Image (spheres, rainbow, N blue to C red):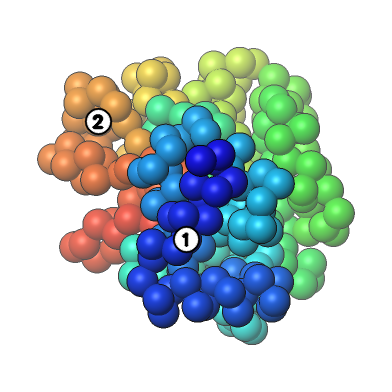
């Protein structure tokens, strides 16, 4: 029995109702909202193993059914949710399939620090947050300033007028931006204009504060992180667990909310969470994160940008 025949054999051994839905879906060119593609994929992997399943899918009648099954994209997910309130942005999808949204008009969560082992995964989360904000809100409601050493990672933001600038962390412009945003907070605190919500996104926080960061900028940055959200000026930052100790403790404490990604080392997990490491033990992939809401830790999965 060749691989194509074996794939069909697996299909035939599924329960009749599931098999009949597959037959219908072949004619209907696949409905991504239905879960049965994932069921068949699991059967194939159990029968053939992970390495061979792609060969089974390729060139078979199942090709257009299985490949989209694992795809969870930001655009399709936002479309499925329909209109969302102004000043919203998406973090991801909770385990009960409920979207996890953030309200940028509510300063209560405070600035956000994302911590984990995988730089790429945390960058993906930051992209989801920023791009969803752009998709949901008009440029007059939201402006984004990005500090990043890898501008190519954020090409998906370039078409949006919300993005004001992308600055490398070692640039003098980065320090000038911190001072400027601190002044904006002070103006808004005294009622001199409100303007749009402003998000300062720092792709690698530990790198930013160690490369070209002068001591006279420190109080401005701390003020920005701690008090900015009350004036609709947010800081979203991320850092790797192995560089956590490079960050000044008072800066860490200025962030109101922490989001944790997968952390393999129990020592590192204790170091960054200061609580029971079980909160990160439940994360099963690099695309899962956890955040504390009131007294409960909520796991969520991020879509592809």
> What residue sits 70% from the left and 71% below the top?
29
| Mark 2 residue crowding within 10 angstroms, few (<14) / some (14–19) / many (20+) | many
- Taking depth in this image into account, of 241 and 249 the one nearest to the observer is 241
Q: Is residue 55 visible?
A: yes
- Taking depth in this image into account, of 18 and 178 the one nearest to the observer is 18
293 relative to 50, above or below: below
Residue identified by numbered label 2:
269
The percent position of residue 19, horizontal first and vertical second, equals: 47, 72
> What residue sits 70% from the left and 76% below the top?
27
| Mark 1 residue crowding within 10 angstroms, few (<14) / some (14–19) / many (20+) | many
Q: Mark 1 and mark 2: span between their CA atoms?
A: 43 Å
274 relative to 7, above or below: above
Secondary structure under badge 1? helix
Is residue 248 toward the left or the right of residue 167 in the image? left
**Count of numbered marks:** 2
Residue placed farthest to the left in the image? Answer: 276
> What residue sits 35% from the left and 36% below the top?
262
The percent position of residue 145, horizontal first and vertical second, equals: 71, 46
Residue identified by numbered label 1:
11
Is residue 120 toward the left or the right of residue 257 in the image? right
Identify the image quadrant of residue 159: bottom right
Is residue 80 toward the left or the right of residue 227 in the image? right
82 relative to 226, above or below: below
- Taking depth in this image into account, of 34 and 59 the one nearest to the observer is 59
- Taking depth in this image into account, of 243 and 266 the one nearest to the observer is 266
The percent position of residue 101, horizontal first and vertical second, equals: 48, 68
Label located before the other in sequence (1 or 2): 1
Q: Is residue 189 visible?
A: no
- Camera-near label (1 vs 2) is 1
112 relative to 13, above or below: above
The percent position of residue 203, horizontal first and vertical second, equals: 60, 35
> What residue sits 50% from the left and 78% below the top?
20
């Amino acid at each position: 029995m060749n691989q194509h025949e074996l794939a069909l054999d697996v299909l035939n051994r599924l329960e009749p109702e599931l098999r009949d839905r597959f037959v219908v879906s072949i004619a209907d060119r696949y409905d991504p909202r239905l879960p049965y593609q994932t069921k068949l994929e699991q059967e194939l992997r159990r029968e053939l193993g992970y390495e061979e399943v792609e060969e089974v899918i390729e060139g078979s009648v199942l090709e257009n059914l299985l490949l989209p099954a694992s795809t969870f994209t930001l655009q399709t997910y936002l479309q499925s949710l329909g209109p969302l309130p102004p000043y919203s942005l998406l973090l991801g999808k909770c385990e009960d399939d409920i979207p996890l949204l953030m309200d940028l008009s509510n300063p209560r969560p405070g600035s956000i620090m994302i911590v984990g082992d995988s730089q790429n995964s945390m960058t993906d989360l930051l992209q989801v947050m920023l791009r969803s904000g752009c998709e949901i809100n008009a440029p007059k409601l939201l402006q984004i300033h990005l500090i990043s050493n890898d501008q190519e990672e954020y090409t998906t933001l370039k078409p949006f007028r919300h993005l004001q600038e992308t600055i490398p962390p070692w640039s003098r412009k980065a320090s000038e931006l911190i001072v400027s945003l601190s002044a904006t907070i002070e103006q808004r605190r005294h009622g001199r204009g409100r303007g749009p919500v402003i998000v300062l996104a720092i792709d690698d926080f530990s790198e930013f504060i160690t490369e070209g960061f002068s001591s006279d900028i420190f109080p401005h940055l701390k003020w920005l992180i701690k008090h900015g959200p009350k004036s609709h000026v947010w800081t979203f930052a991320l850092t790797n667990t192995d560089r956590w100790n490079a960050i000044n403790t008072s800066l860490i404490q200025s962030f109101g909310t922490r989001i944790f990604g997968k952390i393999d080392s129990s020592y590192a997990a204790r170091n960054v969470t200061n609580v029971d490491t079980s909160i990160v033990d439940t994360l099963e992939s690099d695309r899962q994160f956890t955040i504390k809401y009131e007294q409960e830790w909520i796991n969520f999965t991020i879509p592809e940008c």
